Image (spheres, rainbow, N blue to C red):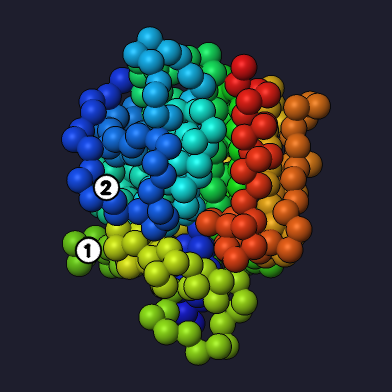
């Protein structure tokens, strides 16, 4: 029974200085290529020694000695840079920023083994590693760097902003606090006893994984819908499992998270010091998103007049991945926020 509960929980949770490499020869993104920007693949390391891979977007016509504001972008939880984060990066590069969409550690084209592992510490560090890279990039003004996290990486972005004083502006779009929902379930429905049972099952799984020499994957999205799934799971499926957003390297499209990743997420809440963020923060959420309460609660904890919550009317959680059929991503708002706070 516990394994069934865990599998179900993870099914909904997944719905969460460097060297240049050769430019990609073929366009492998889930969104159309812009003729207003240049893109190149780059590598950089985080402080754990893990090599991260990203796509660096720059406005065409940047002079060799020109210094621009820059934004590091990642998410959603279980996605890759060829999906939502790349769309955000390309669009913001069209507005004059240098942007870096990157795959987090253990996922996508980034390195690290075992694969498909999440960590509140390492994934927060991944943002700071991207800031390291951008701070040393020839066309970036190191005093004008922001970050943007989508879905579960919205929470990690806020956590990074609480730690890294080099980050001058942070956007969290359709934000999940992945540690909160891992420990407490949706709408904080899991009590201490249920959490203890879950930890027992996960630690039993650790023993089994060691014995087998292989990590068990958590439940993923179904290959086909029955129509009985919750609406938000159907929404995830409509993005990750169709041509709208499918990508072969995406965990949510084509793989499974390592089940025992949940242990560190349960035990390490990420927003403990978010009330100490001095820099600007914008939280963007859909009016009809099942995750909206997480963004609203995160906003309530922030202090200062440079913090803002922006609700997109009529939008659900996944609409802010690619705009959906509502063109829901408020890029004008996000662009003006960065231009105001990265000047």
- Residue visible at 54% across and 48% down? 150
Snapshot quadrant of residue 63: top left
Snapshot quadrant of residue 135: top left
Which one is nearer the viewer's eye here, 322 or 45? 322
Residue on which disc 1 sits: 214
- Residue visible at 29% across and 63% down? 248
Q: In this view, does 97 lie to the left or right of 319?
A: left
Residue 200 at least partly seen = no
Judged from the image, the secondary structure of the residue bearing numbered disc 2 is loop
Q: In this view, does 259 lie to the left or right of 324?
A: left
Residue on which disc 2 sits: 109
Q: Is residue 87 left or right of residue 157?
A: left
Name the N-terminal-most of marks 2 and 1: 2
Distance from disc 2 to disc 1, alpha carbons, whole Å, reads 21 Å
- Residue visible at 43% across and 30% down? 59
Q: Residue 52 carries which label?
A: none
Task: Name the spot of residue 30 as percent of width and height, x first.
Answer: 39, 58
- Mark 1 crowd level (few <14, some 14–19, many ≥20, 10 Å Cα): few
């Amino acid at each position: 029974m516990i394994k069934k509960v865990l599998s179900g929980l993870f099914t909904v949770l997944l719905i969460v200085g460097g060297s240049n490499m050769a430019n990609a020869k073929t366009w492998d993104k889930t969104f159309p290529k812009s003729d207003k920007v240049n893109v190149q693949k780059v590598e950089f390391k985080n402080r754990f020694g893990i090599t991260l891979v990203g796509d660096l977007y720059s406005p065409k016509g940047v002079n060799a000695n020109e210094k621009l504001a820059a934004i590091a972008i990642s998410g959603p939880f279980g996605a890759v840079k060829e999906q939502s984060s790349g769309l955000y990066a390309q669009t913001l590069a069209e507005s004059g920023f240098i942007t870096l969409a990157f795959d987090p550690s253990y996922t996508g084209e980034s390195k690290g083994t075992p694969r498909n592992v999440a960590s509140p510490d390492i994934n927060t560090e991944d943002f700071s590693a991207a800031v390291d890279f951008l701070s040393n990039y020839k066309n970036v003004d190191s005093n004008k760097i922001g970050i943007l996290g989508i879905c579960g990486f919205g929470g990690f972005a806020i956590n990074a902003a609480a730690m890294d004083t080099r980050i001058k502006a942070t956007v969290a779009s359709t934000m999940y606090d992945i540690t909160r929902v891992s420990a407490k379930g949706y709408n904080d429905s899991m009590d201490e006893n249920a959490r203890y049972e879950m930890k027992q099952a996960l630690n039993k799984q650790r023993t089994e994984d060691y014995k087998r020499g292989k990590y068990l994957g958590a439940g993923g999205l179904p290959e086909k819908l029955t129509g009985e799934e919750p609406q938000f799971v159907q929404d995830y499926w409509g993005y990750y499992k169709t041509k709208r957003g499918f990508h072969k390297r995406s965990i949510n499209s084509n793989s499974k998270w390592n089940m025992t990743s949940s242990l560190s997420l349960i035990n390490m809440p990420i927003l403990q010091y978010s009330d100490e963020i001095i820099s600007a923060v914008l939280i963007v959420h859909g009016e009809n998103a099942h995750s909206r309460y997480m963004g609203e609660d995160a906003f309530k904890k922030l202090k200062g007049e440079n913090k803002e919550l922006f609700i997109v009317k009529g939008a659900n959680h996944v609409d802010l991945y690619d705009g959906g059929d509502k063109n829901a991503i408020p890029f004008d708002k996000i662009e003006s926020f960065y231009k105001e706070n990265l000047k």
